[in-house]
C-alpha cells in the first residue's frame, strides 16, 4: 500500500515537473527530473525485493510439504482425564 502511494506521489511529481518544464517555463523549478527518475528506480527495486521475498516464502512452503514434514502437529488428548472432567462439568 505504501509502495502504491509512493508511486502515485512520484507520478504526480513527474507530471508537475513536465508542466513546469514545457507548459509554463517561467514558473519556478520546484522539482528536478533526475530526483523523480531515481525515486521511481528505488521504488521499483523495493517492489522487486518484495516480490522476491514472497516467491522465496512460497518455495519454502512447497519444499516443507514435499519433504513430508508437517508445519503443525496433532496431539491426541482422548486419554486426558483432566480435560474430560472439565468438559463434563460444562
Image (spheres, rainbow, N blue to C red):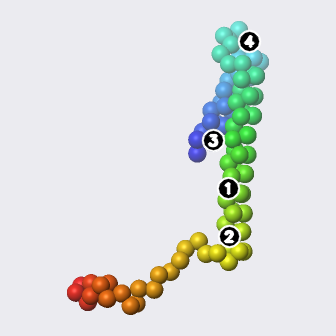
Labels 2 and 1: the sequence-earlier one: 1
In the rendering, which numbered label is found on residue 54? Answer: 1
Residue 87 shows in this picture: no
Residue 64: image tag: 2
Disc 2 or disc 1, which is closer to the eye? 2
Q: Is residue 39 above or below residue 64?
A: above
- The location of residue 12, given as percent across then percent down, is 65, 30
Above or below, 43 relative to 57: above
**Distance between the Cα atoms at labels 2 and 4?**
60 Å
The x and y percentages for residue 22 are 77, 18
Badge 3 density bin: few <14, some 14–19, many ≥20, Cα 10 Å: few
Which residue appears at 68% of the width and 32% of the height? 11
Which residue is found at the position 66% from the left and 27% from the top? Answer: 13
How many C-alpha atoms fall within 10 Å of the one at disc 1: few (<14), some, or many (≥20)?
few
SS class, disc 3 = helix
Where disc 4 sits, the SS reads loop
Give the quarter of the image for residue 80: bottom left
Amino acid at each position: 500500500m505504501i509502495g502504491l502511494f509512493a508511486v502515485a506521489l512520484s507520478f504526480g511529481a513527474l507530471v508537475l515537473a513536465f508542466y513546469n518544464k514545457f507548459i509554463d517555463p517561467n514558473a519556478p523549478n520546484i522539482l528536478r527530473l533526475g530526483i523523480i527518475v531515481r525515486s521511481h528506480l528505488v521504488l521499483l527495486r523495493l517492489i522487486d525485493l518484495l516480490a522476491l521475498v514472497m516467491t522465496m516464502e512460497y518455495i519454502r512452503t512447497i519444499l516443507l510439504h514435499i519433504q513430508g514434514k508437517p508445519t503443525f502437529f496433532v496431539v491426541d488428548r482422548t486419554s486426558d482425564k483432566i480435560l474430560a472432567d472439565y468438559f463434563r462439568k460444562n
